[in-house]
Image (cartoon, rainbow, N blue to C red):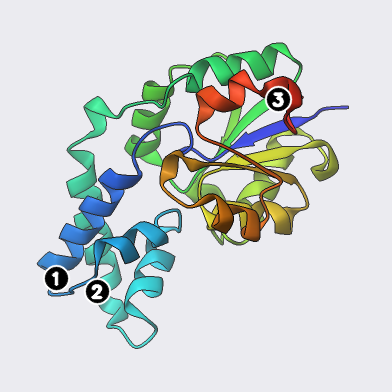
């Protein structure tokens, strides 16, 4: 039976979380909102609409949401030609594919942003499918992104593992019924990832690759 290795992308395979923090902080600042960078960092991993709601609350002017999202996208887009993959991100995916896993991405990115991320990873030859924000009604921490990734892979939840870097990833994976692996390269503390559902936590893709034989992806 098919077994799926589902991966978040931002902060998990590509070192982009702090670029997102800067772009969101500046988009919010330009619109007159003073939001601490640490609060923005904790919200990264949510889809744009959910991130704005999380930071500004339900009493915000919701007509402003699209403008904030567009400003973030324009600011973040300046980095598309130089997004840095995390060490051994591509080799990890290739190793898993050679070990018989179906590799699927589950990300809130789409369009040109997703293309830029995939170029950075440079492992399209082993990525079977991608579940993007365009494909689901609800983003993480709802289980739908992970569930859709499993559908694309043709895999059952009990035979699958989700790797991510945020509490939103871990909550989404747990709700989808898959085993969850956390990585610290997105900047979220180990204890928070474990509390949110991570069965194991590694420093980054390189550390996971080095410890693969003893991991949930063995």
Q: Earlier in the sequence, mark 1 or mark 3?
A: 1
- Residue at numbered disc 2: 64
Element under disc 1: loop
Rendered location of residue 130, percent (x, y): 56, 35
Which residue is at the front of the view, 186 or 75? 186
How far across and how far down the image is residue 201, in percent? 61, 41
**Residue at the (79%, 30%) spot, across then down:** 3
Vertical placement of residue 132 versus 63, above or below: above
The answer to whether mark 2 and mark 1 are in CB contact below 8 A is yes
| Residue at numbered disc 1 | 31
Q: What residue do we see at 42% from left, 26% from top?
A: 118
The picture places residue 42, in percent across and down from the top left corner, at 40, 60
Q: Is residue 66 left or right of residue 217?
A: left
* Residue 76 in which image quadrant: top left
Quarter holding the C terminus?
top right
**Extreme residue toward the right, this view:** 1
The tag earlier along the polypeptide, 2 or 1, is 1
Discs 2/3, front: 3
Position of 92 compared to 2: left or right? left
Nearer-the-camera pick, 182 or 43: 182
Judging by the rendered image, the residue that carries numbered circle 3 is 102
Left/right of residue 196 with respect to residue 70 in the rendered view: right
> Neighbour class for label 1 at 10 Å: few (<14), some, many (≥20)?
few
Q: Residues within 10 Å of mark 3 (few under 14, many from 20)?
A: many
Marks 2 and 3, the one that precedes in the sequence: 2
């Amino acid at each position: 039976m098919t077994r799926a290795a589902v991966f978040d992308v931002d902060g998990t395979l590509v070192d982009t979380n702090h670029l997102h923090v800067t772009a969101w902080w500046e988009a919010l600042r330009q619109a007159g909102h003073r939001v601490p960078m640490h609060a923005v960092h904790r919200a990264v991993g949510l889809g744009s609409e959910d991130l704005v709601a999380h930071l500004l609350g339900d009493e915000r002017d919701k007509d402003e949401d699209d403008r904030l999202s567009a400003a973030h996208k324009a600011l973040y887009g300046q980095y598309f030609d130089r997004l840095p993959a995390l060490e051994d991100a591509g080799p990890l995916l290739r190793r898993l594919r050679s070990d018989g896993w179906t590799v699927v991405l589950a990300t809130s990115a789409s369009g040109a942003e997703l293309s830029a991320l995939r170029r950075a990873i440079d492992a399209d030859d082993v990525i079977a499918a991608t579940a993007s924000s365009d494909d689901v009604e609800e983003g993480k921490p709802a289980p739908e992104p992970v569930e859709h990734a499993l559908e694309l892979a043709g895999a059952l939840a009990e035979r699958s593992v989700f790797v991510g870097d945020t509490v939103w990833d871990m909550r989404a994976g747990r709700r989808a019924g898959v085993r969850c692996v956390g990585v610290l390269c997105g900047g979220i503390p180990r204890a928070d990832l474990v509390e949110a559902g991570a069965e194991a936590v590694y420093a980054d893709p390189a550390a996971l690759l080095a410890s693969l034989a003893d991991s949930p992806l063995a």
